[in-house]
Image (cartoon, rainbow, N blue to C red):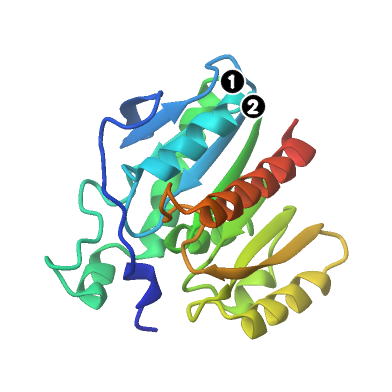
Amino acid sequence: MSGAQCCENPPTLNSGSGNGKVEEFGGLSSYISGPANSNAALILISDVFGYEAPHLRKIADEVGAAGFRVVVPDFFRGEPFVADQKPFTEWMKDHGPDQGFEDAKPVIEALKSKGITKIGAAGFCWGAKVVVELSKRPYIQAAVLIHPSFVEVDDFQGVKVPLSLLAAELDNMCPPELVKQFEAALNANPDVDSFVKIFAGCSHGWSVRYSDEDEGAVKSAEEAEKDMLDWFVKYLK
């Protein structure tokens, strides 16, 4: 898998964007938003461009305003993918989702230590692989995957928490025919609730990498955010 669409349309990173604050959390620099006294938290796991992406922080602020404590960790430790610095395959060797899964565990423990009793996780592109791994074990109580990459059909066999999958129609990383296989795998386990939706006319990365001047793109991104938030409200509130 080349990761071509993963690397397209990179956002302009801005460490000062958003209304939240950046602090160390669970051993990682993290963007934190939402009420500190909430008992429900969300971990947003970025695509390959990392936690400084302005649209990702905008999502964090908005779901934080809905009452969730939101943490967006820097799983890349200051080294998000930059196309002219290193080939994607080389970058992935040092920043695999398997490492993201391990790094997520201390973040989850840090949330629990602060009185959080319900935790959800949403993964965008690269982050979706991390979230589907978390969903197989008792780390989180609800999961959302958005334009996932590096996820395979077998990954859904062991999912143990309610999982929502939001995919793009025009996506060579996760094409509709593969999404249908994911849906069948999820439906094979009737004990775990799932929701699958394909966004017509949207491309990989549409939820966090769009132009604010493109009204249609903004509307599609907002729809994905609402679907994500509704899922977490249903299972964590």
Asked whether 39 or 15 is in front, the reply is 15
Residue contact at pointers 1 and 2, CB within 8 angstroms = no
Q: Looking at the image, which residue sits at the far left? A: 85
Expressed as whole percent of the image width and height from the top left, the position of residue 102 reads 41, 53
Dividing the picture into quadrants, the one containing residue 232 is: top right
Q: Looking at the image, which residue sits at the far right? A: 190
Q: Looking at the image, which residue sits at the far top? A: 37
Dividing the picture into quadrants, the one containing residue 19 is: top left
The N terminus lies in quadrant: bottom left
In the image, residue 75 above or below residue 71 = below
Foreground disc of the pair 1, 2: 2
Residue 167: which disc? none
Which residue corresponds to the image point at 70% horizontal and 82% vertical from the top-left? Answer: 181
Which residue corresponds to the image point at 58% horizontal and 33% vertical from the top-left? Answer: 63
- Residue matched to label 2: 66
Expressed as whole percent of the image width and height from the top left, the position of residue 168 reads 58, 69
Q: Residues within 10 Å of mark 1 (few under 14, many from 20)?
A: few
Q: How many marks?
A: 2
Expressed as whole percent of the image width and height from the top left, the position of residue 92 reads 28, 69
| Left or right position of 41 against 75 | right
- Residue matched to label 1: 115
Res 218 visible: yes
| Left or right position of 99 against 181 | left
In the image, residue 221 above or below residue 97 = above
At label 1, which amino acid type do we have?
Gly
SS type, badge 1: loop
Which residue corresponds to the image point at 66% horizontal and 70% vertical from the top-left? Answer: 156
At label 2, which amino acid type do we have?
Ala
| Left or right position of 156 against 11 | right
Gap in angstroms between the C-alphas marked 1 and 2: 18 Å
The C terminus lies in quadrant: top right
